[in-house]
Amino acid sequence: MKNSTQAFLLLFIFLLGFTSFGQQKKWTIQECVEYALKNNISIKQSELDIKSANIDKSSAIGKFLPNLNTSISHSWSIGANTNPVTNVRENQTTQYTQVGLSSSVTIYNGLQNVNRLRNAKMVQLAKQYQLTKMQDDISLYVANAYLDILFNKENLKVQQGQLANDEKQLKRTQELVNSGSTPRGDLLDMKATIAADNQKVVVAENSLLISRLSLAQLLQLEEFQNFDIADVDLEAKQSSIMAETPEAILEKAKQVRVEIKIAQTNLELAQRDIKIARGALQPSLTFGYNFGTNASYSDRIVGVDGSGTPIIASPLPVFEQFSNNKGHNFGLQLNVPIFNGFSARNNVERSKVDYERTKNAFNQANLDLETNVYKAITDAKGALKTYESAISTMEARQEAFNYAQEKYTVGLMNAFDFNQSLTVFAASQSDVIRAKYDYIFKMKVVELYFGIPIIQKQ
């Protein structure tokens, strides 16, 4: 009994350690992006679209191949009917078996099959482009959520640092009040400041928790309560891409971004649809072949006697009848469309209208890309200037705080003014952190337009 209890305790400790180890996992940005790309429902749907496109391509290839069908039927006729073998009308029950084989192949139909196959290949390519775009979008969403967590972590440290500093000042103020060097009002101000600091810490903790939950839900994790990311120190350094001219970045974006490739593919599909519609106005030529045989289970006439009476014999074996009654026929069929209620011509005109729409969409995609690229460059430059300005402001605020701290220590500044200086300094620290991650994200957007992925594949 004692041994079993010890074994149970060891197992419990092992499982507890294993659970704690699992909860300590911290995700890197690479792991987050890769997990999202693997498990995101929208991406899975896009992958299914590619599979459907592959099936459509297979169907388009099948249009070039002959079809082949076989049939077999067995029928009963009861009552007065004509014997299909003797051709004599009789009142009896007869059985009849037919076996057939048919095949046909389209020789020419206005190149519709050729154009449908090309269409299927382009649709296949367009679906792949759409999957790539969705992967880029998901990667960008994950990166933004990841950076948001890093910002909230650093901001929480700032708020906790301010609280710790104020608690030290509270002790110092208490000592000064006890010695009579400082009025009691300063002590009350410090206590109010610490209460406000605690509130800021709670807000920062909640913001961090919400940002972690947001990323966990974006990754669609089932167990997200203990989700956390690895602490990394990202540098907000200027990318070499910003040395490129906006025109060069735009030209690169036109080459690598799938938005333009999708629009271009859709335009080619619309052109091909016009050719398919026009193919319906042309004659079509089909070759067909049929094979058939039959067997009857009725008695048969094998001759007549001297008085002219038919001589009746039992039916031949079924397979012998199949062999005797087999037949073949084949031929060409030419269909020439003359009038079909304007449906074929209207399809051509409708395809032309769709092409014009797609052409407008293609032009709009180019304009949107140009707008987005220039906006991304402008945003990145503005974010960098904001970050640099925030650093300068923080440095000035720090000097002002150091000076205020010196004055407060020697009793030349009251607690309220000192707390104001500290609050402004802490706010400038938060502004630097916010500007830093805003710049990093906007720089990532510019890099994405230049063909650099969010994460480098290993």
Image (tube, rainbow, N blue to C red):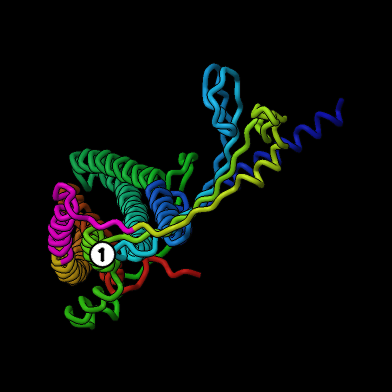
- Dominant secondary structure of the residues highlighted in magenta in the image: helix
Task: Find numbered disc 1 in the image and state the secondary structure of the residue it sits on.
Answer: helix
| Residue 387, placed above or below residue 91 | below
Residue 151 picture location, percent across and down: 32, 56
Residue 84 picture location, percent across and down: 55, 32
Does residue 73 appear to the left or right of 297 in the view shown? left
Residue 361 picture location, percent across and down: 16, 61
Return the residue nearer the eye: 85 or 259.
85
Which residue shows up at 28% across the image and 39% down it?
199
| Residue 438 in sight | no
| Residue 69 in sight | yes
Q: Residue furthest front?
A: 307
Q: Amino acid at mark 1?
A: Arg
Residue 141, located in which quarter of the rendered image? bottom left
Which residue shows up at 55% across the image and 46% down it?
292
Residue under numbered circle 1: 272
Return the residue nearer the eye: 10 or 342.
342
The segment highlighted magenta reads: 334-362
Does residue 84 appear to the left or right of 185 in the view shown? right
Residue 279 picture location, percent across and down: 25, 62
Query: Which quadrant of the rendered structure holds the N terminus?
Result: top right
Return the residue nearer the eye: 154 or 327.
327
* Residue 359 is a magenta residue: yes
Which residue shows up at 81% across the image and 29% down it?
5
Return the residue nearer the eye: 48 or 205.
48
Which residue shows up at 56% across the image and 21% down it?
90
